[in-house]
Image (spheres, grey):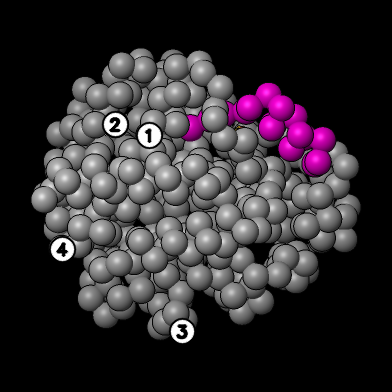
Amino acid sequence: MLKYLKRYSEQFSSNLFSANKLRFLILFVTSQCNCRCSTCFYWQRLNTGDNLSLEEIKKTSLSIGSLHTLLLSGGEPFLRKELLEICRIFIEQNKISILAVPTNGTLTGQILEFSEEVLRTYPKITLSIAVSLDGFKETHDSIRGMPGAFDKAVATLRGLAQIKQRYANLESGINTVITRNTLPELKSFMDMVYNDLPIDFQDFELLRGQYKDKNLELPSLDEIKLIHRAILKNRERYLVKAKSGKIESAAVISLLKFVNSIKERILSGKKTAFACSAGKNIGVIDANGEVRLCELKPPIGNLRDNNYDLPALLNSPFALAMKKDIRKNKCGCTHVCFIKLTVSHHLKTLWYLFSNYLTYSIKHE
Ligand code: SF4
Ligand code: SF4
């Protein structure tokens, strides 16, 4: 029941004392995708067919040392034939604790087979599958550019729920991208998801990056503030459903509130109060071996030209100059992974979370 609190504590303790140690790696395992999402920020790099080979990934993994979380991205990760082998490399060589796989959820058979195999073979790993679902059927299929995508994603979630009955180390949920276009149905969509789908969480990302459909846009700041309130309430009911205790609930809600307040600050045009830790405790490898400090920054080099040595690339003079620039210009964005990793190596975060915990406890006395 204390899984999130345990996870956050681990994240804070490891990041507070070794802020420059890579803990979280985003690995694009393929550029191939079977969808054509209007919200995709990676669309210009899709379906190039240029993916790191298994051998190249193995060499890269050897350069890294231990990692806490591996997040497999793409394209659609489940289109990569050697996905299981790639995971084995990081589980065995890098001792990861969490394997996170965001997916469009359309390849139900592959996803269920993969999950069962990982969970059966590696009972100490937490496998977190997040299926993209951006609205009701018509909205979702139109965003994905694929008729039937909604039904397939729901079938995947139902299949994962069955697997979950046998494996406590599986968590499955939904990632929803918020745009102005999906705003009118967002609250009723949240209700449908909560009432009808067997999931552990529903997370939300704001539309970001150079997305494909230029007609899309973000809601206004005031609208986003209202959505954030609804998201907090939504998260609370999942905690109640999971019978989470007060400490666990306070930890989850406090962190969510904190992350949302940072997003609101950035969207209001103010500079972030935290220097982003991109390229320090979190980094990105593209499908073709290009390395980035974060998904939105230009590449700092390619593993193929650098002996597959990821730490050397992340600490090259070019990368250090880019990190300095990020710090100096107080670069800010709304990507949740980067915000969480950034705040986790600042002591003032602990104070914020503690005061929020007290407020939450008094409110729920
Ligand atoms: S958002 Fe994901 S599923 Fe959609 S086109 Fe881009 S990579 Fe594919
Ligand atoms: S704030 Fe966002 S865009 Fe800037 S470096 Fe960090 S993750 Fe990248």
Label 1 and label 4: CA atoms lie apart by 24 Å
First in sequence: mark 3 vs mark 1: 3
Q: Which residues are magenta?
A: 319-334
Identity of the amino acid at label 1? Asn
Distance between mark 1 and mark 2 Cα atoms: 7 Å
Q: Main secondary structure of the magenta part?
A: helix
Does 127 appear above or below 334? below
Q: Secondary structure at mark 1?
A: helix
Q: Which x, y percent locates residue 74?
A: 56, 49
**Residue 309 visible in the snapshot:** yes
In the picture provided, is 231 more to the left or to the right than 12?
A: left
Q: Earlier in the sequence, mark 1 or mark 4?
A: 4
Up/down of 25 relative to 181, above or below: below
Q: CA distance from mark 2 to mark 4?
A: 23 Å
Mark 1, other Cα within 10 Å: few <14 / some 14–19 / many ≥20 = many
Front disc: 3 or 2: 2
**Mark linked to residue 121:** 3
Q: Are marks 2 and 4 in contact (CB under 8 Å)?
A: no
Q: Amino acid at mark 4?
A: Lys
Discs 1, 2 touching: Cβ within 8 Å = yes
Residue annotated with mark 1: 260
Q: Secondary structure at mark 4?
A: loop
Residue 188: percent from the left, percent from the top? Answer: 15, 34
Kind of residue sitting beneath label 2: His
Q: Label 2 belongs to which residue?
A: 228
Is tag 3's residue or tag 2's residue first in the polypeptide sequence?
3
Residue 25, given in percent of the width and then of the height, sits at 61, 56
